[in-house]
Image (cartoon, rainbow, N blue to C red):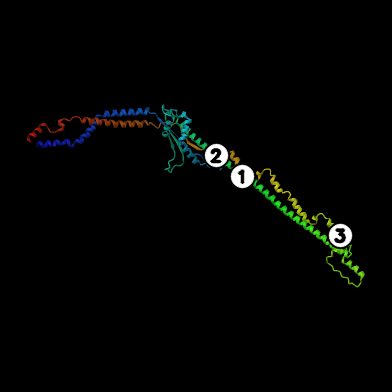
Amino acid sequence: MDASMNARVSHGPESNSDEIDLFALINSLWLQRWLIAGVMALLAIAAGTYALLATPYYQAQSVLKPTSLKSFDQLNLTGVYKVDRDQVLNRIGISLESYSTRYDFFQKHPELFQALEQPGVAVVQAFERLNKSAFTILKPDVKKADSLSSYVGLSFVYPEGVDGPAVVNGLVAYAVEQERARIAAEVSTLVTNRLNKLQSQIAAARIGYEADKQSKIAKLLEADSVKRANLMDELAGLRQQLKLRRQNRIMQLTEAIMIAEQLNIHKPATPSSMRDLGEQASNNLIRTEVTNQQIPLYFMGTEALGAERKALRARASDDFTDAKVGELEKQLRILRNNREVEALRHRGNDDLFLSKLAKWEEETSYLQELKPELLLLDLVDIDQPAVSPLSPIKPKKLLIVVLGLVLGLMLGVFIALVRSMMTRLKPISLTMLNPLPVEHAGHKLVQQ
């Protein structure tokens, strides 16, 4: 009976060991509550001290948006360079992101970065650290389709003592000015190339016109020469024909004179007059007269025929006998001077006769007076210039103190648990190892 009761008593602590350990753990933490509170207070004070002593960092940012369409309208109307405002905005964003742009600005404005200089750190190293951590490019999220407009921005995180807004606004202005200079240089290059092309076209047109004019003059002179040669040949042939006609006439007259002498016709006569002479010799002849017939030449008589033959032999030129000779000589006289050739040769200003020259010279004059830098005054609109922030972005003092309290609580609980475990690992007494009374154990051994 006693043994069974002792057995039941011995199993009681083993079944409730977990509950006793949990209660003991909570009790141990409660007993060490001041230790936990002290650790929390210590870490909270350390966190607060850090939050107060840490260098505050501020953020300044500027946002750029595309300018109005009228800003590039005059330049686009030139036809030399096409400017798209969104493309210009992207180019300025690329320039702001460029290492060379930032480094050039860093070198040209060292007074803005004096607060970042550290002893023993090279200027290039200081800029490398600044370039990697301080600057951020702001741009729309391509995944979001609800963005109403495109923009480009620059964010700069800087410690206290640095004029952040001056850095951001200065860098933005520097990038815009650099891009304006690049676009102006591109426009100037295109304008120069266009002017060179126009000058080449004008020179080629003048050379071509001069060649065409000389070719036209040569053609006109050649045509006149051919026509003159043909007229001279025709005139020579006509004169030869007139000369032959005169010689034939002389031969006809000589023959007629011979007949007239044989007929004893010295004065001009007619067949009727010859008939009258015959009637005087014989009255038995019947008189007959034929009309509408050409009277033979010898009826002119030797005197008239001889006079005509003498005149023909004394004639020096037969030109007056044919009107065509005068016409041919008139045409030859006209061909002595080609008035069209003279007009072509005596043109005072050949440029007046070049059809496209006026247009080219107008474009040349316009391009020479073009000043690209005056047409690029507003590349972008500064939608949000950088201003001095009202509060730093870090350190966040309240968050640091709260984290200090949380870490202090965790560290305090950890220390309390360690102390509790160390206490439980001390040497355990015999009664704790054997819950049965000593007398009962001896009695049990005797029975055995």
Question: Does dot 3 land on a helix, a strand or a loop?
Answer: helix
Q: Which residue is mark 3?
A: 306
Please provide percent x and percent y for residue 265. 89, 64
Q: Closer to us: mark 2 or mark 1?
A: 1
Residue nearest the viewer, comparing 412 with 277: 277
Question: Does dot 1 land on a helix, a strand or a loop?
Answer: helix
Give the residue at the far top of this rendering. Answer: 119
In the picture, measured across the screen, residue 305 lies left or right of residue 415, that is right
- Pointer 3 with pointer 2, Cβ within 8 A: no
Q: CA distance from mark 3 to mark 1?
A: 75 Å
Which comes sooner in the sequence, label 3 or label 1?
1
Which comes sooner in the sequence, label 2 or label 1?
2
Q: Is residue 54 above or below residue 291?
A: above
Number of residues whose C-alpha sits closer than 10 Å to that of mark 1, classed few (under 14), some (14–19) or many (20 or more): few
Please provide percent x and percent y for residue 430. 15, 31
Could you tell me the amino acid type at mark 3? Gly
